[in-house]
Image: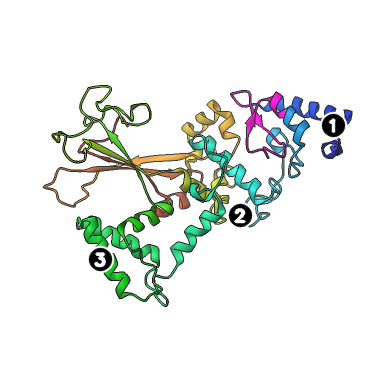
Amino acid sequence: MDRDWMWLPNRLSRDYVEGVKSFIQVAKEHLRWDNKTRCPCRDCQNARFNDLLTIERHLIRFGFSRSYQKWIFHGEEHESQPNEQNDIGVDTEIVDATDADILNEVVDALNDACGHIDNDINLEESTTHGKFDYLLGEANKELYPGCKKFSALTFLVKLMHIKVLNRWSDKSFDMLLQVLVDAFPERSNIPKTYYDAKKMLRDLGLGYDSIHACKYDCALFWKENETLDKCPVCDEPRYKFCNGKGKKIPQKVLRHFPLKSRLQRLFMSRHTTSDMRWHKEKRISEEGVLRHPADSEAWKDMDTQFPWFSQEPRNVRLGLATDGFNPFGSMSNSYSMWPIVLVPYNMAPWRCMKEMFFMLSLLIPGPQAPGRY
């Protein structure tokens, strides 16, 4: 089909306007559940979903994205070769765009998987290639010139692990770090204080959020309940009794490990981005044989109920697992914790079940299995 009209400089010409109307008719057949579809204008770059009227206005105002030669997001078939990939693993037949365009599509895929992610991409949010490169640089940086056994990151994680196991105070840890800084060569990469150590880990995406919880697991003091001092279900006090002196101590604390940045890294790395489409593009399906969760009835039922989700192979499917354990290794202590671990089922079975792809999402304290979080 002749589509020279897409690149006409005068977007108010009759040919261009008629061409846009023909595109809208095609797009009308491929709407999501909310009557929206991807907008292929130069501003949205197929990374945002809009209604048809907004898309028509955008195409008149901004024109079509130069990379959108085939209307693959609006029903057209495309042919992709398994070996034809660019540096980050995205098929060149599907996307021939700049790094910014690719990042927009990554953000959109993650929006479908785990809610809205701001389109304002910056270093503070761990969503850019620059932040990802910083992470790799920190992980590979020498502890001191010539050190082969530890990187700056592995050494810091080891120290933090020892601190937790032995219940060191923050002050004692500060003193240890100061001695290490003085003892090691001047160009060593050791943080000077516990605060600097925590900040480094958080900047690298290794931090967590503390969310107060009801003692009896009725509710979380989060979002609309964040300012409450009593459980909205059972009226149990949020904090332990402390006579109004000193810092308030919560009855129970849920630790949440943010997921979005870790999912983004799977798409940013050229070693894993193609793996996130394996279930759709490389999986061999055979009737009556279960090799992967995608072969299961549950997976197929979800595809039927949410076709808009299944059409995009990069949308993330996560498996959830949990089990209790005693963090102190003492059977005489009844205290236990329940880690909630997520596994990306987009990948091949021999990849997604490797430890490096297990994602700790929640750490729930208490002797009983989680049931209400």
Q: Residues within 10 Å of mark 3 (few under 14, many from 20)?
A: some
Residue 173 marker: none
The image position of residue 350, as x and y in percent, is: 46, 52
- Is 148 magenta? The answer is no
Residue under label 3: 176
Query: Of tags 2 and 1, which is closer to the observer?
Result: 1
The image position of residue 248, as x and y in percent, is: 21, 37
| Residue that sits furthest to the front in the current view | 245
Image quarter of the C terminus: top left
Q: Is residue 242 left or right of residue 22?
A: left
Mark 2: which secondary structure? loop
What residue span does the magenta drawing correspond to?
32-55
In this view of the protein, can residue 58 be seen by the observer? yes
Residue 16 marker: 1
The image position of residue 26, as x and y in percent, is: 75, 28
In this view of the protein, can residue 288 be seen by the observer? no
Query: Of tags 3 and 2, which is closer to the observer?
Result: 3
Rendered image quadrant of residue 46? top right
Residue under label 2: 88
How far apart marks 1 and 3 lie (CA) works out to 70 Å
Q: Residues within 10 Å of mark 1 (few under 14, many from 20)?
A: many
